[in-house]
Each structure stands twice: as C-alpha cells, then as structure tokens.
Amino acid sequence: MWSKIGIVILFVFSQKAIITAQISPRFPSKINAVIARLYFSNSGTFSGNTLDKPDIALWNTIIGEGQSGGPSEATLIEVEVDGDGGGNIIHHERLTITVLEKGKPPIVRHPSSLYFDQNGKHFEAVWLNDSGCLPVTITAQLDQQPPIKKKIDFECGE
C-alpha cells in the first residue's frame, strides 16, 4: 500500500514539474547591460565597467599605463538579461554573445538555457585572455531583438 501511495505522490509531483517547465514567459526577456571589467593580475581584483567610460584611455593596459588602473591582460565580459523571476525561472530564448579581438578568432557563446533568479536576473560571462592591446568588439543579441554592440578601445605602442 505504501508503495502505491509513493507512486501516486511521485506522479503528482512529476506532472507539476512538467507543467511548471512549460509555462511561457510572462514577458520577453531583454538584455539590460553589457559590462566589461579588467582583471588586475597584480591584485586579483576587477575594475569597474570600462564600457561606462567611453573616453577612458586604455593605452598599454597590459603594463598598467593609461587610465586602466593597473596592469591587465584579461577581461571579464558580462551580459545581464532581465526576464521573469519567481516560479518561471528557466527560459530557452536564444542568447548569442560574440567577442571579436582584432586578428584573433571570434569567441561565440550560445547558452542553451537562461536561468533567472527570483528578481528576474540572468548573467552570462565570457572570459577574454591576453587582452589589453587590440580593440575588442562585443555583440550581444537575444532572439530576434536588435543586437547590442560595444567596443573596448585597447591600444599599445611606444
């Protein structure tokens, strides 16, 4: 008898999980922000969002010159997506992040699912090694929405 009750309870919970997973989003998700933070290898810390400062001088960033705030050869790129929170936290919308650094193969990310917290936030990250001398272009697009393009104007020289 207990095994039959257990099977019924398991069936009821599995049906609830299937129904919850199939609920459509209440509103379409959207890209809220594209953020780029320099990683400072001499301190293990990150800069603020360099994309918030369009006039920042990122000259010889790899040795800490310009306005970078310290030597940096790596950049953390984050794309913040706003969507549903609460009970409907998994979306299967198509997010594409493309990072192009002059002269290097592109880095392309296509997460299969977007997992949202209770506040409706999802963050996707791309780690860019050996950055700091060549310009970087970031393109983020969610489904058929217009792409968001950002540029980091790294330069090096004498």
Image: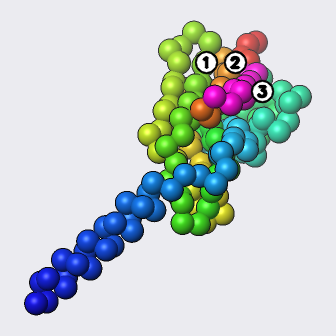
Measured in 3D between alpha carbons, the distance from the residue under mark 1 to the one under mark 3, in whole angstroms, is 15 Å
Quadrant in which the N terminus appears: bottom left
Front-most of 113 and 25? 25
| Circle number at residue 90 | none
**Pointer 1: what residue?**
101
Measured in 3D between alpha carbons, the distance from the residue under mark 3 to the one under mark 2, in whole angstroms, is 10 Å
Measured in 3D between alpha carbons, the distance from the residue under mark 1 to the one under mark 2, in whole angstroms, is 6 Å
Q: Position of residue 24 (x, y in %)?
A: 54, 52
Q: Residues within 10 Å of mark 2 (few under 14, many from 20)?
A: some
| 84 drawn magenta | no
Residue 103 in which image quadrant: top right
- The mark nearer the N terminus, 1 or 2, is 1
Query: Nearer the observer, disc 1 or disc 3?
Result: 1
Residues at circles 1 and 2 in contact by the CB criterion of under 8 Å: yes
Front-most of 11 and 50? 11
| Residue 9 in the figure: left or right of residue 99 | left
Q: What residue lies at 26% left-to-right and 79% top-to-bottom?
A: 9
Query: Nearer the observer, disc 3 or disc 2?
Result: 2
Q: Secondary structure at mark 1?
A: strand
Q: Secondary structure at mark 3?
A: strand
| Circle number at residue 58 | 3
Residues at circles 3 and 2 in contact by the CB criterion of under 8 Å: no
